Image (spheres, grey):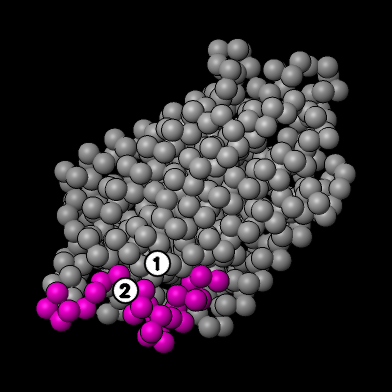
Amino acid sequence: MPWYRQMNRYHWIVLVVASAGWLLDCMDQQFFGLARRPAMLDLLHVRPGDAAMAGTVTEYAGYATMIFMIGWAVGGVLFGIMGDRIGRVKTMMWSILFYSAFTGLSVFSTSVWDFSLYRFLTGLGVGGEFAVGVALVAEVIPATARPYALGALQSCSGAGNVIAALIGIGLGNLQEAHFINSAWRVMFVIGALPALLVVVIMRRLEEPEAWRKAKAEGVAHKVKLGSMAELFSDARWRRNALVGLALAFSGVVAIWGIGYFSYDLLSSVIDKTFRAQGLPESVIAGKKTIWTGITSLMQNSGAFLGVYAFTYFTQWTSRRRAFAVSLIMAMLTTALLFSKLNRFSDVFWMPPLMGFFQLALFAGYAIYFPELFPTRLRSTGTSFCYNVGRAVAAVGPLGLGLLTSRVYSGPDALRYAGVTMCVVFFIGLAALPFAPETKGQPLPE
């Protein structure tokens, strides 16, 4: 029987609500990627096209991204522990409220540093949604449908990014037509809307039976759920946590430390093309927003397909083999884009190719991480892998920013930095020999 026919009405409600939460979470993340460069130009009072300040803008963009990712990691771990202790549904509700509120407050930024503070606080909520969402789906959906349902949930990250890209294109057109002055601020107003999903969560979802049982057994035997001490005192869970951490590190750096800087790379192509035509800066700014949105749309359309491809490929082969293929191909396609993207026509095939393999890794995280830990540690362990991986990976955007401004020089500095950063994929490959194979096995208890 196909996986989708194995699910009843309540299974679908859980999957749809958890997927919607993750979609809106990823839309918010993508807004940051789209808004980061124009926000830095605005807040640093840099004139668009000022080549002398290009390295500085990239450096401060790296700082803001690093701070966002640290908040993401801290919040992810805290909300992950809460997911095991107070429940998946309650924690999801609080994480969505948190990131919605501080996304909206980002509109009022007046400097790089208060902008970064708002992004740090937004990151606290953004980081928590993934772990509790995948734990909830993994524990409610029938076992044989679980990998496909989790793959469908992760595909919503690509859908959320595509929606953000379409909004970015629309706002760019409005800015070019002088209907709005600051597209990036409007993006963050829209990013505050996910708070409305909380109403649905409170009314429709219940805590999974597996979690309620684990909670009752924990009370009876005085065992604390969501215990970091247990996660690292037990050799099996410790190994799984460290393997997951290494895998997540490669993928998160790939996206946040390299992949999303493709928008900045495109900016240099836009400058070269439209300044030669003598267009005014306000028009060029609008075109940058539009073409950044188009690049995001292409990249995340490829990502959407990559998530589905990984979901079926890992069921056909194995978890470890699917990760190995994705890591190698992500490394090659990322290096290709940063070394060869020179024309607008390249936007329609290079970013989709890179996005396909980079986001395929994240399908693996959604499917694989819940299979590594028991119910009492599932949200904590998944959150540790994904979010501590993100904390360590926060050095990625900082490293790319410093490579661009202080190691390499000239108009191709960002290209050299992007290719250099591709060494990060070897960390994930090095962890695979230690990764347990979980395909076809029940969730551990």
Q: Residues within 10 Å of mark 2 (few under 14, many from 20)?
A: some
Q: Residue furthest top?
A: 178
Residue 368 appears in which quarter of the rendering? bottom left
Which span is picked out in magenta?
219-246
* Residue 290 against residue 90 in the figure, above or below: above
Residue 36 appears in which quarter of the rendering? top right
- Nearest to the observer: residue 166 or residue 21: 21
Residue 225 in picture, x, y percent from top left:
25, 72
Q: Residue at x 23, y 60 (%)?
A: 87
Q: Residue at x 72, y 22 (%)?
A: 284
- Count the marks: how many? 2
Label at residue 227 = 2
- Nearest to the observer: residue 422 or residue 118: 118
SS at mark 2 in the image: loop
Name the residue type under label 2.
Ser
Residue 38 appears in which quarter of the rendering? top right
What is the distance, in whole Å, between disc 2 and disc 1 at their CAs?
A: 13 Å
Residue 390 in picture, x, y percent from top left:
52, 60
Label at residue 64 = none
Q: From this viewpoint, is residue 353 visible?
A: no
Name the residue type under label 1.
Thr
Q: From this viewpoint, is residue 78 visible?
A: yes
**Quadrant location of the N terminus in the rendered image:** bottom left
**Quadrant location of the C terminus in the rendered image:** bottom left
Q: Which residue is mark 1?
A: 382
Q: Which comes sooner in the sequence, label 2 or label 1?
A: 2
Residue 227 magenta-highlighted: yes
